[in-house]
Amino acid sequence: RARRARRARRGRRERGARFERREGVGRERGTRRAVKARDERRGRRARTMNAEKRAEIYTYEAPWMIYACNWSVRQDKRFRLALGSFVEEYSNKVEIITLDEETGEFPKEAQCSFTHPYPCTKILFIPDKECTKEDLLATTGDYLRIWQVQDDNTVQMKSLLNNNKSSEFCAPLTSFDWNETKLQRVGTSSIDTTCTIWDIERECVDTQLIAHDKEVYDIAWGGPEVFASVSADGSVRVFDLRDKDHSTIIYESQTPDTPLLRLGWNKQDPRYMATICMDSPVIILDIRFPTLPVAELQSHRASVNTLAWAPHSSSHMCTAGDDSQALIWDLSSMNQPPEGGLDPILAYSAGAEINQLQWSASQPDWISIAFRNSLQILRV
């Protein structure tokens, strides 16, 4: 019995020693896991701090005044933009620039630059999110031009589209819009009162309509077959290519012959569009209830030059103008506006009057504004 008791006591001591060692191994492994988890947390915090430290504004200085600009839609070129100059000469410039995400800077000089006759009234990359088409860029001025961007960042003109070949003179194009559903369709507006729908693949006119009584200043697609335009005659008109003999007047300026300068159609909710009236507030329209504005945005202290609907939200918009301010609006309550009217939810003050504003379709957190010779992209 004594020997069995001694062996039992010795076995308990050995088992206890082995258990303590396993516990020690477990504690050591647990400690390593805890340290690793702590380091990961620190890494996440560091990355978060670095992200917070990362600039919310990036600036590019062009060698001339910027008028036209647009974001690339391609996911593989997220921070690529095209800029058009405003120089009171025949020879103007278009530049393509890309933000270096590692250094957080735009290049000192554009990676691509080419000459353009007259200033671009508008510039757009092809809205090809799936990258199924050629990398195209379109501009308007005297004519509609389609440019192809090569892999080596050179640009070649693919086509020059002119619908008035019988005359040596042309009616300048004030604006255009690229159909996001039928990518071969581009609609242009002109001072000759017409809107022209082009098939850029066949390089011919699909339809030309006498759209207004005076100069047409802007055009916007609301679907594959429907577009709208605004004019110096003070009206917003909607056209359906399936019924070319008729148009619908959605709105007319309260003061006769007060020009409507810009038009934006809400891509997320096509019931709504917005227009800029000269020396008046931005007007929000519901096409189901013609003639009566749903809301008027009145916080700008000077003329509004440009507007953009959020590409990811049906209720957000940005406007900018001669008061050097870019204002972001939440329009979710516009059908029941608060007393005193809607106020912007965010405001940004630029260094001068803002000529151009674009909201990135591929990166909805970013907006670009152009003033003087500066382009700034802002995180919102």
Image (cartoon, grey):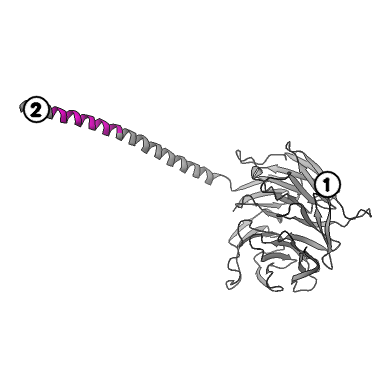
Would residue 117 be visible to someone looking at this image? no
Expressed as whole percent of the image width and height from the top left, the position of residue 41 reads 43, 42
Expressed as whole percent of the image width and height from the top left, the position of residue 34 reads 36, 38
Q: Which residue is mark 1?
A: 159
Secondary structure under the numbered disc 1 in the rendered image: strand
Q: Is residue 287 above or below residue 144?
A: below
Q: Which residue is mark 2?
A: 4
Q: Residue at x 42, y 38 (%)?
A: 39
Residue 16 is covered by the magenta coloring: yes
Q: Which residues make up the magenta segment?
A: 9-25
Quadrant in the rendering for residue 320: bottom right
Expressed as whole percent of the image width and height from the top left, the position of residue 11 reads 16, 28
Q: Give the mark toward the camera: 2 or 1.
A: 2
Quadrant in the rendering for residue 227: bottom right
Q: Residue at x 47, y 42 (%)?
A: 44
Q: Is residue 66 above or below residue 245?
A: above
In the image, is 48 to the left or to the right of 191? left
In the image, is 105 to the left or to the right of 169? left
